[in-house]
Every structure is written in C-alpha cells, then in structure tokens.
Amino acid sequence: MNKQKTIEELKQIIQAEHIKQDEPLREYTFTKTGGNADFLVLPTTYEEVQNTILYAHKNDIPLTILGNGSNLIVRDGGIRGIVLILNHLDKIYMEDGKIIAQSGATIIDVSRFALEQKLTGLEFACGIPGSVGGAVYMNAGAYGGEISQVIESAIVLNEKGELLTLTKDEMELTYRSSLIAKQNYIVLEARFAPVPGDVKEIKEKMDELTFLRESKQPLEYPSCGSVFKRPPGYFAGKLIQDSGLQGAQIGGAQVSTKHAGFIINTGDATATDYLALIKHVQDTVKANFGVSLETEVKIIGEED
Ligand SMILES: Cc1cc2nc3c(=O)[nH]c(=O)nc-3n(C[C@H](O)[C@H](O)[C@H](O)COP(=O)(O)OP(=O)(O)OC[C@H]3O[C@@H](n4cnc5c(N)ncnc54)[C@H](O)[C@@H]3O)c2cc1C
C-alpha cells in the first residue's frame, strides 16, 4: 500500500480534517493501550462510510471498525489499513414512537434519552460505556437486560457497501454475539422499542444500577470491563478470585482487586502486558478448575 497515494485518494471521499495518518489508537481505547492505525477515518455521513468501504474493497485495503473502544484490546503493533470510527454519527431521536440512534451515539446517552421520553426498557444500559454500534454487535447486556430485549431493527452495511435493514430476529443476537459480528457488517443505526413507563421508577432503576456498578467495578482505572465471557455453569470472576489471582500483575496490567473479572491499567500497561496477563489467568483457571475462559473482549491488530 502506497500511503501517500492512499491519503490523497481518501481525501476525495472524506474531509481532510477527518483523516488521520499513523494515529495512536490508545487514545481511542478504554485500556489506553495499543499501537497506531495506518489511517483513521472519521466519517460524518452514511455516504462517507459507504464510500470508504467501497474504496477499501476496491483497493484491497483492510478495513477495521472501532466503536467507543470499551471492549477492545488493540495489539501494540497497531492496525494496518483503514480504521473507521463513527463517533461523529451520533444523533438520537424519536420516530413513530421508537428511538432511532446512530451508531456513534453512546448507549448510555440512548438510555438517558429513553428516560427523558418516559420510556422503559433501556435502564440496563445506563452504565455500559459502548457505542450503539458496539452494543448491537456485542448484544451488550447487564443486570438481566440486554440489547436483544429492546431492539427492533438495525441498518447495516455489508462488506461490499450495500445497505441492509435487519430485523431483530435476523440479527441473531445471542450472548455477546450477533450475525453482525459473524458477517462483519457495519452498523449505521438502530431502532429501539422501549415502552411507556413511570419516569420515577425508570430513574430509580438507573440510580440503583449506577450505584451497583460504582461500588463493584474499578471505574477509577482504565479497563475494558469484563475480560472473559461467563463460562456455562460458572462465573468467570469467582473462578479467578478462587484461583487467588486478584492483584496478579504483569507489567502495568493487573487483575483488579475490586472485581476479579476486570483487568486494569495501573498506569503504563501495554497491550502485550494485557495479553500476557489474560493468558496467565486462562492457564491458571484451567489448571485449577478445568474450565476454559473465553475472552469477551475483542483482540485485534498486529504484534509489535
Ligand atoms: C467499565 C466497563 C464496564 C462495562 N460493562 C459492560 C456491561 O455491563 N455489559 C456489557 O455487555 N459490556 C460491558 N462493557 C463492555 C463494552 O462497553 C460493551 O461490549 C460495548 O457494547 C462495546 O461497545 P464499543 O462501542 O465500545 O465497541 P468497541 O469496544 O469499540 O468494539 C467492540 C466490537 O464491536 C465492533 N463494532 C464497534 N462498532 C461497530 C459498528 N458500528 N458496526 C459493527 N461493528 C462494530 C468492533 O469492531 C469490535 O469487534 C464494559 C466495559 C467497560 C470498560
């Protein structure tokens, strides 16, 4: 890939100030780790997203989409090709009694918008720090609620840049996965169908969940939330705790002493530290309990 040629061609599609070259992705991830993107592109319209996909496809340039970076570890070698972030596409509005949210809006803002509209069903999302796109892709959930319970449909682009509308059933939303993840679709917007509720009860529920989150999670440190999926019949945090791993540290990455399912960045962690600690936790839990912990966090990019 000729970088100079690529940047000139990208400028035909995206305004120059929304293209960054050799951009450090640690600025865009919640762990504050990770290498550089060759090109970071921040589109402001759906057409720009579509044109970027078509351009990448035509020129055989790898394309990676990031959301809010709250469930990601980007390896220290960074990401080759084009990285797309849709955080300029962040409108949230009502249409026919449903909430339409663009992919780059945060799901926390969607939850707050539902409260303002006196709608119930999105309280569970009030502390999940992802974007709408990332939340739909992951079928994010907490405290008994998840995206699949409240989403009606989503507009996505496939790898050829074709626009598709998927109903909830077509999205195949399962535990922290979806058809969108399997097919590498890009979410542009989602339609949510919360129902009228009592504003006081909605607010109380959100306050209660916020209190639970703040008291149990190490929110004072950078992290990517729960690192591992819940293994059938177990809780990942309990297995890690019972293995005596809380406080275990490699480089600047540490298994949280507050919540065993979290790995925090104590200050100068690299993605390599994170990955070594994840492997150490997986190996130790496997040796102690015979359970394989699968990562919930997505690990992408190249080694240093
Ligand atoms: C403190 C903390 C608490 C958390 N609590 C919870 C919780 O309670 N429940 C929960 O489920 N998760 C939780 N998470 C994890 C995370 O917030 C969710 O998984 C969230 O849905 C990820 O969204 P994101 O936009 O940050 O995605 P990213 O981390 O940026 O990306 C995750 C995946 O989604 C893909 N993606 C992102 N945007 C799009 C798009 N527009 N189209 C297609 N694919 C896309 C990416 O390619 C990547 O594979 C927590 C994380 C933190 C740091």
Image: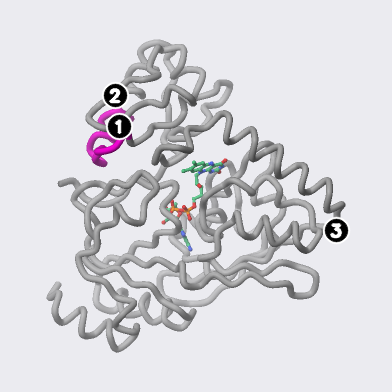
Work out which quarter of the rendered image holds the N terminus and state it: bottom left
**Majority secondary structure in the magenta region:** helix
Amino acid carrying label 3: it is Pro
The residue that appears at 42% across and 41% down in the rendered structure is 224
Q: Position of residue 295 (x, y in %)?
A: 41, 36
Dot 3 falls on a residue whose secondary structure is strand
Q: Which mark is residue 253?
A: 1
Q: Please identify the residue farthest to the front as the structure is shown.
A: 220
- Cβ–Cβ below 8 Å for labels 2 and 3? no
The residue that appears at 18% across and 46% down in the rendered structure is 303
The residue that appears at 21% across and 47% down in the rendered structure is 76
Q: Which mark is residue 88?
A: none
Dot 2 falls on a residue whose secondary structure is strand
Amino acid carrying label 1: it is Ala
Q: Where are the magenta residues, as a range?
A: 266-279
Q: Please identify the residue farthest to the bottom as the structure is shown.
A: 12
CA gap, disc 3 and disc 1: 44 Å
**Mark 3 residue CB less than 8 A from any atom of ligand 1:** no
Q: Position of residue 6 (x, y in %)?
A: 20, 79
The residue that disc 2 covers is 249
Q: Position of residue 238 (x, y in %)?
A: 51, 18
The residue that disc 3 covers is 196
CA gap, disc 2 and disc 3: 47 Å
Tell me if residue 262 is in the magenta stretch.
no
Tell me if residue 269 is in the magenta stretch.
yes
Looking at this view, is 61 or 44 the one in front? 44
- Cβ–Cβ below 8 Å for labels 1 and 2? yes
Count residues near mark 2 (Cα–Cα under 10 Å), then give few for <14, some for 14-19, many for 20+: many
